[in-house]
Amino acid sequence: MTAGESLLKLHFSDAFRQITRKSDLPEIHISFYPFAGLNHTIRLRRQQIYVRLSDIVRDAPASVHRALAFILVGKLFSKRVGTEYQNLYRQYAYHPDVQRKSDLARQQRGRKVIGSSIGREHNLDRLFARLNRRYFNNELTPPTLTWSARKTRRILGHHDYVHETIVISRSLDNDDVPEFLVEFVLYHEMLHMKHRPKLSNGRRVYHTAAFRADERRFDYYDAAMAELEKLSNRK
Ligand SMILES: [Zn+2]
């Protein structure tokens, strides 16, 4: 273990003691991991804490490591931590150099998790081609289309600008999900390819008025909205 790593462990021990107010320290395992992006995980298993930090933060300043320790341990025990830690980490994470590293990691590593566009019930390539013809004059360049690895219920679709990828939740790849609903979720993500986000008061607005107007052009808009409502109530 290097000096930097034992210092890192010390930050996590301090965070644990201050946040839980317990003196008997569990064993803490910390490793760096080549995540696709600036992600970190922390979990508790058999009274031991396992931390995986993005390898992007390996060379971050000690103050950032300390802030991250408090944020992650706080998350693990659902405790709010001081805003100074949040601000310190955010300042670091939003720095252009760090953002660039994170984007690069996503580009180079993210590809590994790309699955298949052909589901058990619905074929995304076919649906994309049909929607592109019907609503976009065939002007959209097909992105990488894929079903998500997991059956996410809250997030049904996602468009990733960095990869030009559309991911649709595998929870929709089911025979009780009507095709027009899969089409509508895909159509929404395709609209993100057409409507780039606009800046408003320093925030990015993704669903602009023009976006929403286009969304309502979908032939089965009302039926699709009703189905989405049903899905969200099923949880
Ligand atoms: Zn959206």
Image (cartoon, rainbow, N blue to C red):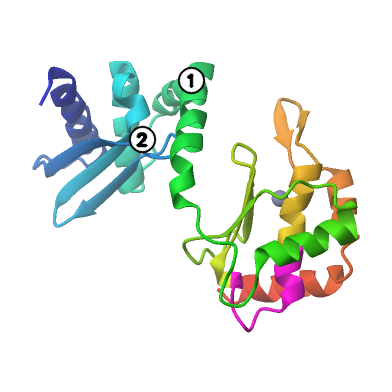
Instruction: Give yes or no for residue 161 being in the magenta stretch.
Output: no
Q: Do the residues under discs 2 and 1 have CB atoms within 8 angstroms?
A: no
Closer to the camera, 196 or 65? Answer: 196
Q: Quadrant of residue 39?
A: top left
Q: Quadrant of residue 206?
A: top right
Across and down, in percent, residue 203 comes to 70, 30
Confirm if mark 2 falls within 8 A of ligand 1: no
Above or below residue 37? Residue 141 is below
Q: Which residues are magenta?
A: 172-184
Residue in the image at 37% along x and 27% along y: 56
Across and down, in percent, residue 176 comes to 63, 84
Name the side, left or right, on which 14 lies relative to 126.
left
Circle 2: element type: helix
Q: Amino acid at mark 2?
A: Ile
Disc 1: which residue: 91
Q: Amino acid at mark 1?
A: Gln
Across and down, in percent, residue 28 comes to 15, 40
Res. 207 visible in picture: no
Disc 2: which residue: 71
Q: Quadrant of residue 13?
A: top left
